[in-house]
Image (tube, rainbow, N blue to C red):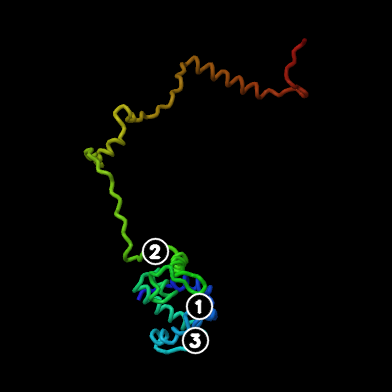
Amino acid sequence: MAYDPSYADAIASIESGGKYGLLGPVTKSGDRAYGKYQVMGDNIGPWSKEVLGVELTPQQFLANPQYQDAVFQGKFGQYVDKYGQEGAAQAWFGGPGAVGKLERKDQLGTSVGDYGKRFMSALGPQAPALGNAPQAAPAQAPLSLAPPQQQPSVLAQLASLAPTQQQQAQPAQPYQAPQAPVLNAPQMQQIAHRINLAQAFSKIPLPQGYRGFTYGS
């Protein structure tokens, strides 16, 4: 049995606005529609017996939202299996004999065709079943006629990273400290003489108040 919760929402939006306690106007035959899906009173007994196994009165049906949902699911699902979605809505509106008779109208002036279109509009776009959804073919890379380029080997890659002969560093030369100049004997004697004079002058006491030599103007 085909059934989708969106079917109930679509029919309820047309019939009652989702109100389980709604009573429709009395028809010329003296009957009226009951509940969220506006099931005619004459259909409540046989439909509830068929779907629930219990024959309900219109009052029992109106007082129980679960009964209303179950009966709608059973009967509307049968209509979908037999007539398709829009055909099921036409059958719900005017009975199975009204399917395809688009110009037939009820006492309020609504036609079978208009009711089916309203149902399909309320139903909205339907997503395909996951099991039947077409799978997109994987994208294929464009065919190339150029010969494939060979990747350099690991040894070649390492060789490309090695410096060339001109770039190779020269071996480091050992560090050589600068050599001190070699002094001859006369130069050594002169230096020693200067050191002795400086030591001798450092031992001479300076007069009190001496502040260094002054030169006349």
Chain-order first, disc 2 or disc 1: 1
Position of residue 22 relative to residue 209, above or below, is below
Q: Nearer the viewer, mark 3 or mark 1?
A: 3
Q: Amino acid at mark 2?
A: Ala
Q: Residues within 10 Å of mark 2 (few under 14, many from 20)?
A: few
| Label placed on residue 127 | 2
Secondary structure found at label 2: loop
For the point 35% across and 71% down, the residue is 83
Q: Amino acid at mark 3?
A: Pro
Q: Position of residue 195 (x, y in %)?
A: 57, 21
C-alpha span from label 3 to label 2:
36 Å
Secondary structure found at label 1: loop
Chain-order first, disc 3 or disc 2: 3
For the point 49% across and 70% down, the residue is 110
Are discs 2 and 1 less than 8 Å apart at CB?
Answer: no
Q: Nearer the viewer, residue 161 or 184?
A: 161
Q: Nearer the viewer, mark 3 or mark 2?
A: 3
> Which residue is identified by label 3?
58
Q: Position of residue 63 (x, y in %)?
A: 52, 85
Are discs 3 and 2 less than 8 Å apart at CB?
Answer: no
Q: Position of residue 121 (x, y in %)?
A: 46, 64
Position of residue 131 relative to residue 28, above or below, is above
> Which residue is identified by label 1?
36
Q: Amino acid at mark 1?
A: Lys
C-alpha span from label 3 to label 1:
13 Å
Q: Position of residue 174 (x, y in %)?
A: 37, 29
Are discs 3 and 1 less than 8 Å apart at CB?
Answer: no
